[in-house]
Amino acid sequence: MAIPKGPHTVIRGNPKGSTLVLEAGFQGTAAIVAEGVSDLTLEGFTIRGNRTEMKSDWYLPPGETPFADYFTDNGIVVRKSAGVKIRNVAFSGIRAFPVIVSASSDVLIDGLRIADSGTLNRAGRNNTSGGILLEQGVSRFEVTHCTITRVTGNAIWTHSYSNAPRSSDGVIHDNTISTVGRDAIQVGHATRVRVENNSGSDLGYPAEYVDIESQAVAVALDTAGNVDHSVYAGNHFTDVNGQCIDLDGFHDGSVTGNSCIDKKPLDAYPWLHEGIVFGNNNPQMESTGVVVTGNDIEGFAYGGVFLIGHGNRIEDNRFLDMNRAHCGATPVPARCAYATDQPDMLRAGIYLANNGGRPAVTRGNVIRGNTITGFGMAEHCVAAAPGVAVAENTASGNRCEEAPPRVAVP
């Protein structure tokens, strides 16, 4: 269904129920496509996809091909449009993305119900598909009150290549996400985005779907590219088989009042990683001006924070039951056989690093008032990489203790 260019288009389902079905032989970009429209409203119907098997020929798009130009068999694809509202639409069995919005503005996505969508590549790993994607510089957007479950890739994310504008002025809030193979929420190459009051569970499952060859473990709140003046606040997740918060590219923003709690036996999390990880892979940014406060991170394989950069504050957080992999024990556990020249990297509660993708100067950070418990935490609370001095940062008032005996939860 191609929406003609122009203003004021409304497609509304019948109150008794309306369903669009993609048959097995469908060939096209999506069930509904729109380009160059304004004041578009899509609401109150169902799209049932044509996914009959999990594996596909899709990997990540080659070069800088937009996802909307690479993936077919999507649910809704909107390009270069303004005033877009997609509300109360249900999706199931979509082979690629239920929703892609590309290079558009003033976008509202509200109350979507997405289940059993996305595919795997031929190697059986997720290819990022299955959720809601805003790409190539979407501005003034809101994604709210969506329920997303059993998708192979990312649930909600923004993505822009370096040749496109960054996404901007958006809010992702009050969504519920469960059983996804990649990230719950990723903010990629964006500015002025708020991610608030989202919740979920079972991230990085099924574990065999995780794209471990690309080191793309699941993350509750992920970052990529250059992201500034943004806020991650009040988000709560359980059973995260990966990282809680990845700040690769995040600067001049805040991360407050979030939680990730893992209480199952360690074997239930084969790709379990660090609590919070700073990074600087994007050359247009430096890790500075980040406030991390009031977060609860519990039960991760390595440390609480992998920190780079300067002028950051890590205050009043609780990192409980860290280093479940027991890095620092003898003999070295298999999970800890990485960067053996930096033994503190995986066993320290907070690690001051010298490289987060690119070499970094790590000084002038404040690490204060945190509670850190776990294996070896009394001895390895705050530690530094070669060439980084803890004394060039302010570390005070942190309570570091061995973890109390763990009560297993089935």
Image (spheres, rainbow, N blue to C red):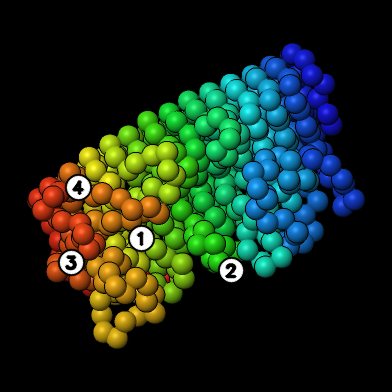
Question: Which mark identifies residue 125?
Answer: none
Chain-order first, disc 2 or disc 3: 2
How would you rate the neighbour count of disc 3 (Cα within 10 Å): few for under 14, some for 14-19, many for 20 or more?
many
Label 4: state its secondary structure. loop
Three-letter amino acid code at the position of disc 1: Glu
Chain-order first, disc 2 or disc 4: 2
Residue at image mark 4: 363
Write the residue at 39% across / 79% down.
Answer: 334
Write the residue at 87% across / 52% down.
Answer: 24
Three-letter amino acid code at the position of disc 4: Arg
Write the residue at 26% across / 72% down.
Answer: 343
How would you rate the neighbour count of disc 4 (Cα within 10 Å): few for under 14, some for 14-19, many for 20 or more?
many
How would you rate the neighbour count of disc 1 (Cα within 10 Å): few for under 14, some for 14-19, many for 20 or more?
many
Residue at image mark 3: 380
Residue at image mark 2: 208
Three-letter amino acid code at the position of disc 3: His
Does residue 368 appear left or right of residue 69 in this picture? left
Mark 2 to mark 3 CA distance (whole Å): 33 Å
Chain-order first, disc 4 or disc 1: 1
Label 2: state its secondary structure. helix
- x%, y% of residue 356? 36, 54
Three-letter amino acid code at the position of disc 2: Glu
- x%, y% of residue 82? 65, 20
Q: Identify the image quadrant of the C terminus.
A: bottom left
Q: Nearer the viewer, mark 4 or mark 1?
A: 4
Question: Which mark identifies residue 274?
Answer: 1
Mark 2 to mark 4 CA distance (whole Å): 39 Å
Q: Are marks 2 and 3 in contact (CB under 8 Å)?
A: no
Q: Is residue 338 above or below residue 390?
A: below
How would you rate the neighbour count of disc 2 (Cα within 10 Å): few for under 14, some for 14-19, many for 20 or more?
some
Chain-order first, disc 4 or disc 3: 4
Mark 2 to mark 1 CA distance (whole Å): 20 Å
